[in-house]
Image: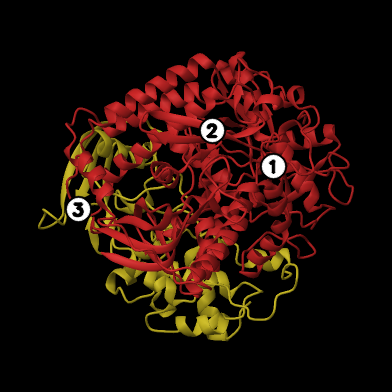
Amino acid sequence: MQVKLRICRYNPETDQRPHYEDYTLEAEPNDQVLDLLNQVKWYQDGTLSYRRSCGHGICGSDAMRINGVNRLACKVLVKDVGTKITVEPLLGLPVIKDLIVDMEPFFEHYRAVMPYFVNDEPPPEGERPQTPEQRARFDDTTKCILCAACTTSCPSFWASGEYVGPAAMVQAHRFIFDSRDRAAAERLQILNDRMGVWRCHDIFNCTDACPREIEVTKALGELKVAISTGKVE
Amino acid sequence: MEHQYEVVIVGAGGAGLMAALHASRGAKTAVLSKLYPVRSHTGTAQGGVGAALGSEEEDRPEWHTFDTVKGSDYLGDQDAIEFMCQQAVSTVYELEHMGLPFNRTPQGKIAQRRFGGHTNNETRKPVRRACYAADRTGHMILQTLYQQCIKEEVTFFDEFQVLDLIVQDGVTCGVVAVELLTGELHVFHAKAVIFATGGWGRVWEITSNAHSYTADGCAISMRRGIPAEDMEFFQFHPTGIYRMGILITEGVRGEGGVLLNDGGERFMERYAPTAKDLASRDVVSRAMYLEMRDGRGINGKRFLHLDVRPETVNKYAQQDGRTFPDGSPYQLSASDVLAKLPDIIDFCRTYMDVDPLTQPMPVQPTAHYAMGGIPTDVHGRVLIDEKNTVMPGLYAAGECACVSVHGANRLGTNSLLDIVVFGKESGLQAAEYAAQCDYIPLPKEPDADVRQRLDKLFKGKGSEKAATLRREMQEVMFADVGVFRTEEGMQEALEKVRELKQRFAGVRVGDSGKVFNTDVLEAWELGCLLDIAEVTTASALARKESRGAHAREDYPERDDDNWMKHSLAFLEPEGISLRYKPVTVTRFKPMKRVY
C-alpha cells in the first residue's frame, strides 16, 4: 500500500523555523513507523534525523508525536495509524534537529528525585528478603524506559518546564514503594512542591501515552496520598 | 577539544556501567556512549542472569561451570568459566543490594527459572538457575546500574561516538570521539581505556539486535592491529519473531513452552531426547533449520510454532513428569504466563496480532550474540597475539570481548552474567593500572585518521548508497554464514563482502551538516560491519569442523585433534590473516555433547 508521510523538519544549520515535508512510500500494514522513517533516510533524504536503537519498544529512543499523540515509532504499525501519517518531535523540549529534541531538561528532572536505591544498613551475605507481595507493590513503575512520552504529553509540563513531570515521579514511586529502600521520606519531601506532585491535575495524557502501559496517573495519585497521610502503604 | 581522564570507558550498557561504578571509586573516570546509557542493548535482555544461588533447589557453581564448558562445545577457557561461575553468586547478590527488583520466591529469596543447558549435574535434569525480573531482567540490570552511577556521580559523555583508539608505541593513550550534538571531534587522553561496546548482530538480515549494534569497538581495535578471537562463532537464537527477528526469550521454554512443526509434532524430542526444548541454543536452532529445510515449517514456510498456551504446556509437562520443587505436578495458568512473560505477550500482540495465551507464536532463528570478539584475559586485559601478550592500558568487557567464557556457543543467562562479572573486574583492574602509571604523551594530531575516514564519506563519488550495501551484506551473511555453512556458500559470501567493501569507497553521505549527522555515522558503522563480516567469514571458512554455533554441512563433526583451538584474525592491508592459540583446559576433558 502507499503511505503519505508528513514529517516536521528543522535543520538548525539552514532553517529559520520548522516546516513540513511530504514523502510517498510503499509500505506493508505491519511496517513500523520507524521502518518508514528509515526508508526516507536511507533511500530518499539522508539528512532526516531521529534517534532509534532497539527497534522493538524497549530502549525508548524513538518517542515522537505520530498523528498528534506521543508514541514510540518502533511500536506503532502502519495498520494502527492509517496511510496518512504525520510525524513531529515531542512537545515541551527544545528541538535540536528534525525529530531530535534536547533530552537534558528531562534527565535533569529525573536526577532530581533521587532515582536510585538507598539503604545504608550493612547488607546481609545473601539477598535482602522481600515477599512476592512487597515486590508486586512497585512492579508497574519498574517498567519505565525513560522515553519521555508521558512527560511531554502533559499540559502541565507544556505550561512550565520547571514541573518535574510524570516520568521522574514514576521513578520516585518505584523506590518509595520498595520495602527495601530507606529514602521514601526524602523523596516525598522533594515531590511535595508546587512544581512537584501537586502540579499533576489527573489529565491522564501520561497514562495514555505510556508505551509500557504503566498506570502513571495512578502512581502519581499514590504519591499524593503518601504525602497527605505521611504513610507509604 | 581535549579531555583528560585516567580511565575512559566506551559504552554504557551493563558491562560499561558496572566497570564505571567500580573504576570511578579508584580513578578519575569518564563514560562515553553513542546512546543515552539507558538506551543500551542490555535493556532488551529478557530471561535472566545465571547464578547457582540455589534459591529453589540444590545448585552449585561447579555445576554451572561444567554446563558452561559443555555448552561452549569445549572451546571456552575453563579457568575463565570457573572464575565467572564462582563470581556469579556474589555478583548477583551485589546487584540485589543495589536495589535490583528480582522476582521473589514465597520465602522472599531471589526467584529462579529454568534455562537451556543449565542442569543438575547429578540427575541431568534442568535446574532453576536463571535469576529473573519478569521478562525484563536486562532492563532492570541496566536501570539499576545507571541509577547507582547517578548516585555516585559518575561522569558521562552521552551521545559521544568513539571512532578511534589512540595508541603510542604499543601503549593505550586514549580515544577519539565525535559529539553528536555539534559534530565536533574530541580527544580523550587516558591512561586506560575499557571497550564495552557490545555486539554486531546487524551484520545479518534477521537479528534480535539493535540498529546500533554495529561492532564499533571490535572494528576499531582491529584497525589498530589487535586481533579478533573466534569470530566464526555467532549465536543464532532459536526463537525470533518471524521475519522481524525480535527476541522471544528462552524463558518461554523454561516455563514449559514447546516448539512444534507443521504436523504439530514436538520435534525437539527427536534431536535432544533428554533436554528436549531446553537443549542448548545451537542445537535447537539447527533442529529448526532442518525441520524447515525438510518442509515441516508451518505451511511449508520458514517458521515454526512456539506454543506457551497453558493447555499445551500442561499436556507436555505431564508427559515429561515435570513437578514443582515440592513434588506436586507442574501446572501453568494463563495468569502465570501473564505475570512471568508480560513483555513477550506485548511484543506478539503488537507486532504479529498473535495472543500467546490462545495462539502459538511464529518463530525462526535470529542472529543474536557474538561469542567472539576482542581477546582478553580474566581481568579484562586485551591480548594482542597467540602468546597472550597484554596490551598495556587496554581493556574489553561484555559482548565485544572474548575472554573466552562462551566458546563456540553461549548458554542463555550467561551474557548478563558475563557483563556484570567482567565489567566489574575490568573496572577494578583499569583503575588499579591507572593508579600505577603516568599519562603517555599523545601523538601529534591524534584525530588525523578519523578526519580522513570521515572526509572520504563526505567526498565519495556518490555511486553507492550505504543502505543498499548494508542490505546486500545482511542478505548474503544470513544465507551463507548463518545456522548452517558450506565451503561453497562461505566462499561466495567472502567474495561478495570484499566486493561490497570496494563499493563502499563509492559511498557519499547525503547530509553534509554538523549537528546530529546520523547519516555519516550510519555509513561509518557500515564500514565496521563490513570489516566484521569479512573477518567472520574468513575465520569460518578456515575452520574445517562443526563446533557449537559453527555448523558445517561439509564437516559435520567436531574435530578436537585439529581444531580445539581459538582462532585469532588480524585485519591486514592484503586481507585477513589467521593464527591460533590453545584452549585452556583445567578439569573437564572434551566429551561428546549430548542433550
Tags 3 and 1 both on a single chain: yes
Q: Earlier in the sequence, mark 3 or mark 2?
A: 3
Residue at image point 67% right, 81% down: A121
| Residue type (three-letter) at the residue carrying disc 2 | Arg
> Which residue is the site of mark 1?
B584
The label number, if any, that marks residue B432 in the structure image: none
Looking at this view, is B25 or A16 the one in front?
Answer: B25
Q: Secondary structure at mark 2?
A: strand
In the image, residue B132 lies at what x, y percent? 66, 54
Identify the colour of chain A in the image: yellow
Where is residue A135 shown, x and y percent of the image?
67, 65
Q: Residue at x 76, y 44 (%)?
A: B586
Pointer 2 and pointer 1 on the same chain:
yes
Q: Chain of mark 2?
A: B
The N terminus of chain B, quarter of image: bottom left
Q: Secondary structure at mark 3?
A: loop
The residue pinned by badge 3 equals B514
Residue B579 marker = 2
Distance (Cα) linking label 3 and label 2: 41 Å
